[in-house]
Image (cartoon, coloured by chain):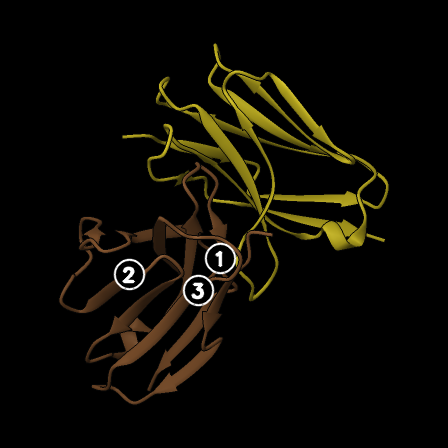
Chain colours: A brown, B yellow
Amino acid sequence: GAVVSQHPSWVICKSGTSVKIECRSLDFQATTMFWYRQFPKQSLMLMATSNEGSKATYEQGVEKDKFLINHASLTLSTLTVTSAHPEDSSFYICSATGGEETQYFGPGTRLLVL
Amino acid sequence: GENVEQHPSTLSVQEGDSAVIKCTYSDSASNYFPWYKQELGKGPQLIIDIRSNVGEKKDQRIAVTLNKTAKHFSLHITETQPEDSAVYFCAASKGYSTLTFGKGTMLLVSP
């Protein structure tokens, strides 16, 4: 149980384009979903927290107009990187909770912006 | 806010040895402490967690201990195997709030 999927697993895009990443909880209802960014050999950096049907709460320093988060249902959250630039290249990971403290992570999405 | 320190940053052991990773936290109100294993190119996988009303928890070769007074918790892996090689992260949170992660420990188990 407690499986979280992400799609796509990797994506390459041109600078200036937008990229959407999906995060799904497959076998539970996710009341809260989190989006993280991870640079090589570093820890996870929380970008934002989203609750179903509410606006996401962004961490300090994260541009909400650049990283659009939508949590439209209890099983799906999306992260859209708008007007992507090479510095946005990173490993993006989502996690989800079903009303408890435990966060279950997705497999991650590797984004490369050329 | 919460601050989690994790040591060591790298740990090399021989297969069959034990491995111990230690974390300290700063906020005495933190009450939930999970440990995650992350293999290269993959998302973190929860391997064990402990809540503040418990001092120790064990699951086969993995155990976690918590010392609330000293504000530190440790991961113990016995009889290590090459497939245990990965990066391990500790984390802390207060109830249902966000997790604060340590910087990670790269564990290398040599055959």
- Figure check: A6 above or below B108: below
Q: Kindly identify the amino acid type of the residue bearing the numbered disc 3.
A: Arg
Nearer the N terminus, badge 3 or badge 2? Answer: 3
Local secondary structure at mark 3: strand
- CA neighbours of label 2 inside 10 A, class few (<14), some (14 to 19), many (20+): many
Residue displayed at 45% across by 77% down:
A8
Q: Kindly identify the amino acid type of the residue bearing the numbered disc 2.
A: His
Q: CA distance from mark 1 to mark 2?
A: 29 Å
Residue displayed at 18% across by 48% down:
A60
B29 sits to left or right of B103: left
* Residue A111 lies in quadrant: bottom left
Local secondary structure at mark 2: strand
Q: Same chain, marks 3 and 1?
A: yes
- Figure check: A69 above or below A16: above
Q: Are marks 3 and 1 in contact (CB under 8 Å)?
A: no
Q: Which chain is home to disc 2? A: A
Q: Check disc 1 and report the residue beneath it.
A: A41
In-front residue for pair A48/A16: A48
Q: Check disc 2 and report the residue beneath it.
A: A71
Q: Which chain is home to disc 1? A: A
